[in-house]
Structure formats: structure tokens, C-alpha cells
Amino acid sequence: MCYGAVTLPCCGLTHSVCDLLAAGVMSSANDLPSQKGRIAQIWVTFWLSALRYSLVTLGVVSGIAGLLVSESHFRSTSAQPRITLGDDAGELRTLYANAEDVAAGKRLAESSCAGCHGINGVSTSAGVPHLAGQRAAYLYLELKNYQAGVRGVSAMNNAVKFLSDDALFKVSAYFASLAPSQPSATNGAIAAAALDPVQVGKTAAAGCAGCHGETGVSKTSGMPSLVGLDPKYLVAAMKAYKGRQRKNDLMKSMVANVSDATMDTIALYYGLQKAERAQTPAPGDRAAGTSASAACSACHGAEGVSGNAAIPSIAGQDAQYLAVALQAYRQGSRLEETMKGIAASLDEDTIKNLSAYYAAQEPKQPNVRKPLTVDEWSQRCDRCHGVNGNSTDPRLPALAGQRVDYLEKVLHDYQTGARKSPQMAAMSDVLTDHDIDSLAAHYAAQKAEVVVYEIVPAR
Ligand code: HEC
Ligand code: HEC
Ligand code: HEC
Ligand code: HEC
């Protein structure tokens, strides 16, 4: 019954047809037309629809077992009708594998999957997930997804292209039955480094407090407050000092060694501080400033609170800084065409009065969402993925102990739509890159609880 040998597209190895058929790897009807009909298998199939929603005792399982003769081992256009199970039953079928199924799955895994996923389902290759101990129904569903092309193009498409449904079921059962990979010490170290961005910002801003005030509210004339400003503006200002578009040697030296990522966290920190007026004197004629401010309100807002991130709010700002800034625009030492044109026509008194007026206005906290911490995020994820990513639903993947690089990759895939899942699209949509890094590190560092995968007695 075993003719010739074939080379598998996935691993390049040559196998005897006999081995492949025994392992349920081949779709005989499609691949070897001459074989069609020669092999009839006696196949015992459980009538699973009765078991749709719960794992019932084995007694019930065997009680409703039925005998079926078919070619169902092969993914084919077989003439024999196959019992069609409901959607859920199809998924949950993986929960009823017996020792023979698992052994057949192991043979297939050895020949076709181990090269990438490791023979124990523990991957040592970047981008290749661990499969050991992963939930059985989930594995099966994902293999179907690769076959259907739903997960985009990857090494997996070829690996599963020619596998029959039974082969998918058995290999899923095999990997699910293995002990999961446990997090390594390095994963733990990465997780410990994944800190709350607001805290990172606060720490990085410690050296700024001497001039700009502890929480960004200036107490020193000539020093701008950093509260009440949109984080995007603050980041742009820091970059302008660094890149010398905005010339100020002092500020250039302050931000010279600050990375872009740290600038983001500093701006976030100030954006979340309470907006208060600078605690500095504001000499000048406020009433005269009020009328002069008519020329400014179209851009900076009626009372100095701008609704546009590109235009800074000036309400409650230190008066001396406002005056120096206007003089700098007027003299051309601060290069910005819009403000240069406007400041050109302002005399010293008007500058002083405008500064007094705006310094007296009430600043407003910009619209900044406090990002969730990893703990807050993971509580939301755990609702579906189980405590610390140890899923208790066989259809949902465990995340605990998974490779950090793989978790990062797939979270980005959900965001871009390269991998489609309505639930995960909604969850990943609002994640920042920082959130993704932190969550991937968090789950990679969780202990994978061993879930006993029960193998049913032979049929
Ligand atoms: C050439 C390397 C390669 C081979 C061979 C291979 N895989 Fe994969 N597998 C991958 C990569 C890479 C991914 C991740 C792809 C992605 O991001 O979608 C993956 C993903 C998977 C997933 C998804 C896991 C999850 O957590 O979502 C399953 C299940 C899987 N493989 C099972 C198998 C099985 C079963 C075999 C053998 C029949 C196999 N793979 C053979 C490389 C391989
Ligand atoms: C020694 C005092 C001093 C320190 C320390 C200092 N700054 Fe400044 N900062 C200034 C002065 C003075 C200006 C106004 C410069 C100008 O006229 O452009 C300024 C301006 C700024 C501005 C622009 C404000 C605006 O409204 O456009 C930002 C943003 C800023 N600083 C951020 C920081 C950050 C972040 C740190 C810490 C890493 C820091 N500064 C440390 C003195 C300081
Ligand atoms: C057409 C829009 C527009 C008008 C009108 C306008 N501004 Fe501005 N203003 C800007 C923009 C844009 C900036 C940011 C420029 C930069 O990056 O240096 C700015 C910056 C400033 C700054 C610097 C703030 C800081 O935190 O460093 C001050 C002060 C200022 N404007 C005051 C005024 C006053 C006073 C008037 C009215 C006399 C006025 N502006 C009118 C657009 C405008
Ligand atoms: C409403 C339920 C739900 C929530 C909440 C949820 N997930 Fe998922 N997650 C799923 C489902 C369903 C899948 C499988 C989707 C598929 O087939 O691609 C999945 C898959 C994943 C995967 C792919 C696992 C693998 O092995 O390939 C990762 C990673 C993941 N989720 C992370 C998260 C993170 C991080 C959060 C929290 C920010 C989260 N999930 C919240 C339902 C959820």
C-alpha cells in the first residue's frame, strides 16, 4: 500500500508515502490520485455535538461513540460523507484526542514542525512561537487559519498547506500535551525594565526642576512654565533646541543627551501636571494688554489657551519669558515667520502689557490621557487570556512564557491588520509602542501554569 517517496514542501525532507499516510499528513485524493480509494480506513469518530459546551465524563463520551467508515483521514473531496460538526464542536474536538492521535501528531511534528518549533514545542528561533502546552483548540484553529490564508504570508503557509484536517487535529493535540516553556531570567529582567512612562518622565525631568519648577510651574522670572502646554509642542520645542532651529545654548545643553523616547515621557509628565499660573511677578498694564490681545486671540485662544498643538498656550505663562520671547521674534533671534511678522509691529510697552495680561490668565491642562500601566493593561487582557496569561478557555491562547519577540510581532500584526481578529483589533488599536513592548515583556516573564491535557482512552 505504500508507493514511492515524496518531498515535503515544508521541511525539504523526503518521506515514504507510507509514513506520511500513517501520520495522516497527506491529502491523498489531491496529492496522489492513484491512491484514491485504495485506502479505506476504519475510523472511529466520536459524535461530538453532544459535547459542545462542556467536557463531560469519559463514560458519556464512550457511550455515544459511534463507528464510522470513511476516508475522513484525508483532506479531500472524498465521496464518503463526513459527520459535520457544529462550529464549536469542530474546535473542541481537539479535547478528545487519544494516545494514538497524540503519537501520530508527534511523528508529524518530528518530520515537519520540529525544525522551526523545536521537538518539544519550545522554539529557539526569533519570531517562531513556542507551541508546547498551548491550548489545543486554539492551535487547531490557527492551523486552519494558516490554511485559509487568514494569517498572511509566513513560513507557516507552506508548512500546513498539504495537511489533512486529521493531521491538524493530531499535531495540535501533541503540542498541547507537552509541558510549556518557562520564562527565562532575561525575560524577567526585560519585564522589570518596562516601567510606567510617567515615572520615567518624572525621573528624567528631575534636572529641569531647578529652573522650570518641581511640577513645571515656574517660580523664577525669565523661566517658562512647562505646564498647560500640549506634549506635542513640548517635544517639538525640545527637538528645536537640540537641532539648533531654536537657538539657546542653555537649553541645547539641557536636552543634548535626551533621546526622543525620553522626550516623549518628559512631555507626558508635564502634560499630566496640574496647570497653574507661574508664581512670578507680572508688571505692566493688564487692561491695555487686554485690548492688544485681540490681535492674538485667533491663534492663541481668547484667554491664551490654544486649541491647537502647534500653537502654544500662553495663559499663566511667566511674564518675563513672554516678553523675552516676543522680543526674540521681533529681533529675529527666534526664527518663526508667523510670530516674527506679528511681533515686528509691537513696541516695548505693548509687549510688557500683553505679557502682564497673559500671565494673569488661567492656564488649562492639555487633553492628555494618562496611559495605563502594564498592570492595568494586563488586567484587561487577562479577562480573556486568563490569570497572568494562563488561558482557561481552550480556544484562547495562553500568553504566559511565550517568546517576547513573537508577542511583540503579533501585537503589531493585529494593529496593522496583517493578522485579523475582531477582539484583538479592538484591544490592540489603542496600544502605544511602549505598551506593546511592556505587555510582551510582561507576558513573556509570567510563569506558564501547567494545564493537564487529558488524553482520552483509545477508541
Ligand atoms: C519554516 C519554519 C516553520 C515550520 C516548518 C513550521 N512552523 Fe509553525 N510557525 C512558524 C512561524 C515563523 C510562525 C509565526 C508566524 C506568524 O507570525 O503568524 C509559526 C506559527 C505557528 C502557529 C501559531 C502559534 C500561535 O501561538 O498562534 C502554530 C499553531 C504553528 N506554527 C504550528 C506548526 C505546526 C503544527 C507545524 C508542523 C506541521 C509548523 N508550525 C511548522 C514557523 C514554522
Ligand atoms: C538652568 C535653567 C534651565 C534648566 C535646568 C532647564 N531649562 Fe528649559 N528653559 C530654560 C530657559 C531660560 C528657557 C527659555 C529659552 C528660550 O528663550 O528659548 C527654557 C525653555 C524650555 C522649553 C521651551 C518652553 C516654551 O514655552 O517654548 C522647554 C520645553 C524646556 N525648556 C524644557 C526643559 C527640560 C525638559 C529640561 C530638563 C531636561 C530643562 N528645560 C532644563 C532654562 C532651563
Ligand atoms: C497666526 C497665528 C498667530 C498669531 C495671530 C499670534 N501667534 Fe503667537 N505664536 C504662533 C505660533 C505658531 C507660535 C509658535 C512659534 C514657534 O514655534 O516659535 C507662537 C508663539 C508665541 C509665543 C512663544 C510661546 C512660547 O511658549 O515660547 C508667544 C509669547 C506668542 N506667540 C505671543 C503672541 C502674541 C502676544 C500675539 C498677539 C500680538 C500672537 N502671539 C499672535 C501663532 C500666532
Ligand atoms: C475579548 C477577549 C480578548 C481580550 C480582552 C484580549 N484578547 Fe488577545 N486574543 C483574543 C483572541 C480571541 C485571540 C485569538 C485571535 C486570533 O485568532 O488571531 C487573541 C490572541 C492574542 C495573541 C496572539 C497569541 C498567539 O499565540 O499568537 C496575543 C499576543 C494577544 N491576544 C495579546 C493580548 C493582549 C496583550 C491583550 C490586552 C491588551 C489581549 N490580548 C486582550 C481575545 C482577547
Image (cartoon, grey):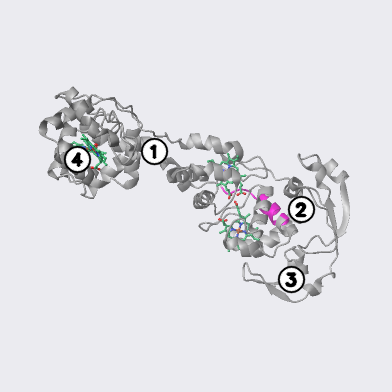
Q: Quadrant of residue 9?
A: bottom right
At 43% from the left and 44% from the top, the residue drawn is: 434
Of marks 4 and 1, which one's residue comes earlier in the chain? 1
Q: Magenta stretch: residue 133 in it?
A: no
* Between discs 4 and 3, the one toward the N terminus: 3
- Asked if the residues shown at circle 1 and circle 3 are in contact, with their CB atoms under 8 angstroms apart, the answer is no
**Residue nearer the viewer, 379 or 315:** 315
Could you tell me the amino acid type at mark 3?
A: Asp
The residue segment tinted magenta is 169-181
The residue indicated by pointer 2 is 99
Q: Amino acid at mark 1?
A: Pro
Using the image, determine if residue 29 lies above or below residue 311. below
- The type of residue carrying mark 2 is Ala
- Which of the two labelled residues, at mark 3 and mark 2, occupies the earlier sequence position? 3
Left or right, 424 with reference to 304: right
Give the SS element for disc 2: helix
Q: Alpha-carbon neighbours of circle 2 within 10 Å: few (<14), some, or many (≥20)?
A: some
Q: Left or right: where does residue 54 sit relative to residue 42?
A: left
Q: Pick whichever, 341 or 159, lies toward us.
A: 341
**Residue 386 seen in the current view:** no
Mark 4 or 3: in front is 4
Real-space CA distance between mark 4 and mark 1, rounded to the nearest whole angstrom: 38 Å
Residue on which the image places disc 1:
197
**How far is the residue under mark 2 from the one under mark 1?**
49 Å
What is the number of the mark on residue 31? 3
Viewer-side label of 2, 1: 1
Q: Quadrant of residue 158?
A: bottom right
Label located before the other in sequence (2 or 4): 2
Tag 4, which secondary structure?
A: helix
